[in-house]
Image (spheres, rainbow, N blue to C red):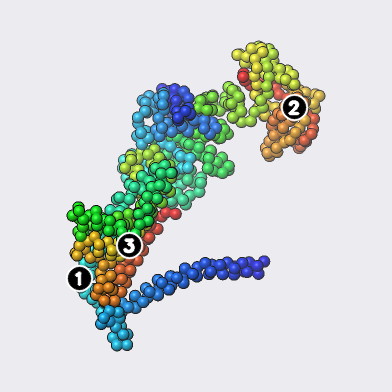
Amino acid sequence: MPASSSRTDKGGRLTRWLVTLPPALFLVVFFLIPALIMAAASFREPGEFGGLAPLAERGLSLDAYRFIFDDVIYAWIFAKSFAVAGLTTLLCLVLAYPLAVLIVRSPKRQRDLFVLLVILPFASNFLIRIYAWMIILGPLDLLYRPVAVIIGMVYVHLPFMILPLYTNLEKHDPALLEAAQDLGASKWTRFWRVTWPLSLPGVLSGAALVFIPVLGMFAVPELLGGTGDLLIGNLIKEQFLDNRDWPLGAALSLVLTVVVLAVAGVSSALTRSRGQP
Amino acid sequence: MALLEIRKITRRFGKLEAVKDVSLDIEAGEFFTLLGPSGCGKTTILRMIAGFDEPDEGEILLDGSPLAGTPPEKRPVHTVFQSYALFPHLTVAGNIAFPLEMAGRSRDEIRRRTGETLALVHLEDKGDAFPHELSGGQKQRVALARGLVNKPRLLLLDEPLGALDAKLRERMQGELIALQREVGVTFVFVTHAQQEALALSHRIAVMNEGRIEQLDVPEVLYSSPKNRFVADFIGTINLIAADVVESTRHGLRLSAPGLGEIAAPALMQAKSGTHGTLAIRPEHLRISPHAERAELKNHFAGIIGEYLYLGDVTVYKVRLDNGLLIEALATNAGPGRARFHEIGNRVSVEWRHDAGVFLQN
C-alpha cells in the first residue's frame, strides 16, 4: 500500500511540475529577468548617446535615485499622478456602482446582454477609442485640458470597476435586504448597512484594477492632455525615448512599482480584516 | 378584539389564486400555525402580514387598525426567515442589535437588551462570533433572538426548522415552545411538517390550495378532522369507503363493501344512504391473534402483510379479507414478545364502536 501511494504521489508531483513549469518559465524569461535588468539599470550611469555607460568605466551609482529625491518636481508629478488615479477611481466607482446594481437587478437574460455591452469596447483598439475621444472633445473645447485626461481615464477603466462590482453584487442573498427591511431599515439604511459593506471586497478589487493601471498610463495624458498634464507614466516613457536616460527611467519605474505594491498590499489587508469568509 | 384579524383576503398571481377568501383571528400570546403542503398559500399569507405583499381583496388588521399601505419596515412585525438571513458582515451581537439600532434606541439600551437576548437563547459566549462560525442550531437561535429583541407585536416564522437535522429539530422545537412562553410574543408559524405543528401550536389552520380546510386546536384536528384532506394530511389514517345504513343519536351503522357492517360514532348530518369514508387512526386498531374470538364490536379477519419495527411501537400492515390494506399500531410495552405478530399470521383487526370519524363525501 505505501509503495503504490508513493508512486501516485510521484505521478501527482510530475503532473504538477508539467503544468506549472511552462507559465513559470515564461514569467521568469519575460517578466522576472527584465524586471531585474531594469532594477540593475537603475544603479548604472546613462550612456552618452542613450543606453547605459560601460560598467567597467563608470561603475554603479545612486545618481538616478538622488536625482529623483532631490528634485521636488518628481514628488510633485508623483502626487499629481496619485491624485489623478484617485479621482479616476472615485469617479469610476460612482458611475459603476449604480450600473452594477441595475445589471444585477435586471432579468437573467438582459443581464448577460448588459455584461456583454460592458466588455464590448475591448473589441476595438484602445488607441482608436482614444482618438475617437479627441474627435468628441475637440469641438467641445475640452481637448488638451486636465478634464480631458480624467474623462479618458474614466472611460478606459470603467469596465474594470463594473465587472468586479457586478460579480460581487450578484452573490448577495436578496433575503438579507428583506430581513433588513423587516427589522425596520429604510431604503437608504438598507443600502448603507447591508449592500455597501457586503460589496466592499468588490469595491476594493475594482479600485485596485483602476487605480494601479491609471498610475502607469501614459497614452491618455499624452493624447488628450496638455503640456502641463504629464503623469509618471509619461515621465518614464520620456526618460527611455526622448531623454535617453535609462537609469533615471528605470529608477522611476522601480519607485512606482514599490508604491503600487504598497497600495495593493494595504487594499488586500483591508479586505481580509473585515472578517469575511 | 383579536391581535391580528385577517378578513376575507384573496391574493392572485396572474391566473393563480394563491390565497382564496381567507379569514382568521390570532389572539395575543398565541402560538398559531399555518400548516399545509407547499404551494397552499401559507407563505403568501405570512408575506402579506409582514408587508412584503398586499392582498388583492380583503384586509389585515393589527390591534384593530388596517395594515394596508404600511411598508414592512414600519410594521411592528418581525420575521424569522427560512434561510435565517443573518447579516454575514455583522457579529452575532451586531445582528441582534440591528433592529434596536433601526428603532433608534440609546446605546446603553442596545447593549443591555442585546446581552439579555443573547442570554435568552443561550449564546452569551457567541456575541463576537460571525454567523459563518456558527452551527445550524446556533444560527437558528440568533435569527430568533434578532426577531424577538425589539419586542414585536408578532413574530412570523417561515419554516425556521426546515434546515436542521432531525435530532436538532426536535430539540429546537422544545426551545421554541419554552422561548415563546417566556417572552409572551405572539408567534405565527408556517410549516408543512404536521408533527411539528401538532407539537408546537396552540391552534393550527390547515391550508390547501389557498383555503383554510380546518382551524382548531391540535387535539381536535387530529381526532376529529372535518374532511379527507385534513384527516390524510395530519398523521397517518386508514380510510375505509362506507355507506350509512342507519344513523341514530348513539351511533352510525355503516356498510363497507366486502367488509360488512361497521359501528361508528354518531354524526348528526349523516342520513341513511349517505356515501362517505370512515377515517380511523392506526393507534385505535387492535390486532388480536385469535381471528375467531373477537372482543370488540368491529372486527375483521386478515393476514399480516408486513411490519415496521420502530422501537417503541410496531406498525403492522394487515391485508383484510376484502383486499383492503389497513395500518395498525401496537406499542411494544407488553411483556416479552407475546404481542408480536409474524408476517403471514392470520389475525383479527378490531376497534371500538366509538373510534374513528365518518367523513361525508
Same chain shared by disc 3 and disc 1: yes
Residue type (three-letter) at the residue carrying disc 1? Val
Image disc number at residue B307:
none
Chain identity of mark 1: A
Cα separation, mark 1 vs mark 2, equals 102 Å
Residue A16, placed above or below residue B128 = below
Q: Give the label, 3 or 1, closer to the camera.
A: 3
Nearest the camera: A104 or B346? A104
Q: What element carries label 1?
A: helix
Dot 1 and dot 2 residues touching (CB under 8 Å): no
Q: Where is residue B67 in the image (x, y as percent from the top left)?
A: 37, 28
Residue A82 visible in the shown view: no
Please report whichever mark, 3 or 1, sits nearer to the chain's N-terminal start.
Answer: 1
At label 2, the amino acid type is Gly
Q: Is residue A201 above or below residue A230?
A: above
The 10 Å Cα crowd at callout 2, few under 14, some 14 to 19, many 20 or more, is: few
The residue pinned by badge 3 equals A213
Q: What element carries label 3?
A: helix
Q: Where is residue B143 in the image (x, y as percent from the top left)?
A: 45, 42
Q: Position of residue B142 (x, y in %)?
A: 45, 44
Quarter assignment of residue B243: top right
Please give the residue where the numbered disc 1 appears in the rendered image. A72
* Residue on which disc 2 sits: B323
* Residue type, label 3: Pro
> Residue A27, percent across and down?
43, 70
Q: Name which quarter of the figure residue A264 lies in.
A: bottom left
Q: In this view, does A113 lie to the left or right of B170?
A: left
